[in-house]
Image (cartoon, rainbow, N blue to C red):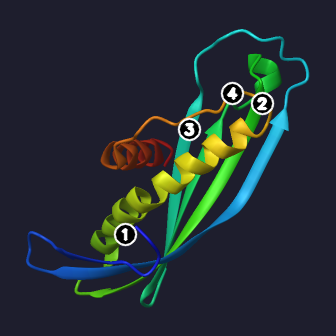
Amino acid sequence: MAGGDIIKMEMKNKKYITLNFKRYMVSKIDFKYNPEFSGGKGKMDINFGHWVAIKNDQAQVTLRCTLFRNAKKEEKPFDLEVHMTGFFSFKGELEGEELKKLISNRGLSILFPYMRALITNITGSSGFPPIVLPIINVNQLLEKQSSQDESTH
């Protein structure tokens, strides 16, 4: 989906929203090589998070991906944290939590392929074999993060 594409969605309650993806930008790349890494294989440590900011008819959705946190302690090749922000405009009849949930879901679905390609490029350019993130179910990601947020309050 290229910037400027418009998605029109109608909800079960017959309310609608038109979401326009404008662009994305990489807002953070933090790569730290672990010089003590001696090779070997281990479980891939991937974590995602996100946040949404909505103001008037504009929204920003930020997706965070971390690979191999605590590389030295966990004997992993590197630490990597990437933040990617998507910029959207919208109009429609939704508001509040319903609007935020829909923009989160659609925004993450749009951003994830860009994040996936970026992670592959970063890791492949770092001297390590490229890492291709697995496809994710955005609904499950949102449910998991929601349940983690609720358990911390």
- In the picture, the disc for residue 103 is 1
Front residue of 18/48: it is 18
User: Which of these two is toward me, 93 or 122?
Assistant: 122
| Mark number, residue 67 | none
Residue carrying label 2: 78
Q: Which residue is mark 4?
A: 129
Q: CA distance from mark 4 to mark 3?
A: 19 Å
Q: Earlier in the sequence, mark 3 or mark 1?
A: 3
Amino acid at the residue labelled 2: Phe
In whole angstroms, how far apart are the C-alphas of marks 2 and 4? 12 Å
The answer to whether the residues at label 2 and label 4 have Cβ atoms under 8 Å apart is: no
Q: Are marks 2 and 3 in contact (CB under 8 Å)?
A: no
Determine the CA span between mark 2 and mark 1: 32 Å
Q: Earlier in the sequence, mark 4 or mark 3?
A: 3
Q: Which residue is mark 3?
A: 47
**Disc 2 vs disc 3: which is toward the camera?**
2
Q: Secondary structure at mark 3?
A: strand
| Image spot of residue 131 (x, y percent) | 61, 32
Q: Which three-letter amino acid code belongs to the residue tagged 4?
A: Pro
Quarter of the image with the N terminus is: bottom left
What SS does tag 1 mark? helix
Name the front one of labels 2 and 4: 4
In the image, 64 versus 41, the foreground residue is: 41
Q: How far apart are labels 1 and 4 at the CA level?
A: 34 Å
Q: Earlier in the sequence, mark 2 or mark 3?
A: 3
